Image (cartoon, rainbow, N blue to C red):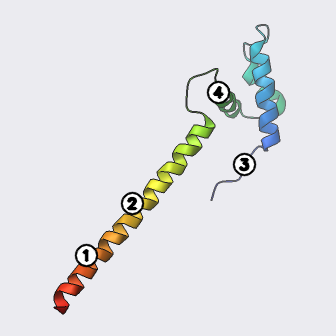
Amino acid sequence: MAAPRKYTEEMRERATRLALDARRDPASKVGAIKRIADQLGIHPEALRTWVRQAEIDGGTAPGTTTADAQRIADLEREVRDLRRANEILKAASAFSRRRSSTAS
């Protein structure tokens, strides 16, 4: 179970939008994240992480997008489940072979 979120999704989107807009303006770019985080009562590193991810998702920065990260996590979960099922089937097959060889 995931931990409860400290900031609402609405607050996160608003803060990210404000920071991205401020960073586009050369006059307000320097210190924009810290300034906006302080104004909104958000930890600056949280806002910095959100902005970095928004830039990646928007294609303006290199990295793994949110959608790709979710897809990777889903595929890893599926592989884990399939490996577990494969181990169960191998064990059942071995048990079945042992049982049929002792019954003969």
Q: Which mark is residue 94?
A: 1
Instruction: Give the image location of residue 2, x and y in percent.
Output: 64, 55
Residue plotted at (71% across, 53% down): 4
Q: Which residue is mark 2?
A: 83
Dot placed on the residue nearer the N-terminal end, 1 or 3: 3
Q: CA distance from mark 4 to mark 1?
A: 51 Å
Ranked by sequence position, the earlier of labels 4 and 3 is: 3
Residue holding disc 4? 52
- Amino acid carrying mark 3 in the image: Arg
Q: Between tags 4 and 1, which lies in front?
A: 1
Q: Residue at 34% of width from left, 66% of height from top?
A: 87
Mark 4 or mark 1, which has the lower sequence index? 4
Q: Amino acid at mark 4?
A: Arg
Q: Nearer the viewer, mark 2 or mark 4?
A: 2
Cα–Cα span, label 2 and label 4: 35 Å
Q: CA distance from mark 2 to mark 3?
A: 32 Å
Of the pair 55 and 1, the residue shown nearer to us:
55
Q: State the image coordinates of residue 12 (x, y, percent, origin top left).
A: 77, 37
Could you tell me if residue 41 is visible in this image?
Answer: no
- Distance, label 4 to label 3, CA atoms, is 19 Å
Q: Secondary structure at mark 4?
A: helix
- Which residue is tagged 3? 5
| SS for callout 1 | helix
- Would residue 104 appear left or right of 12 to someone viewing this image? left
Return the residue found at the far front.
104
Q: Is residue 88 visible?
A: yes
Q: Residue furthest top?
A: 27
- Find residue 72 and report its horizontal and vertical position in percent: 52, 44
Contact? badges 1 and 3 (CB < 8 Å): no
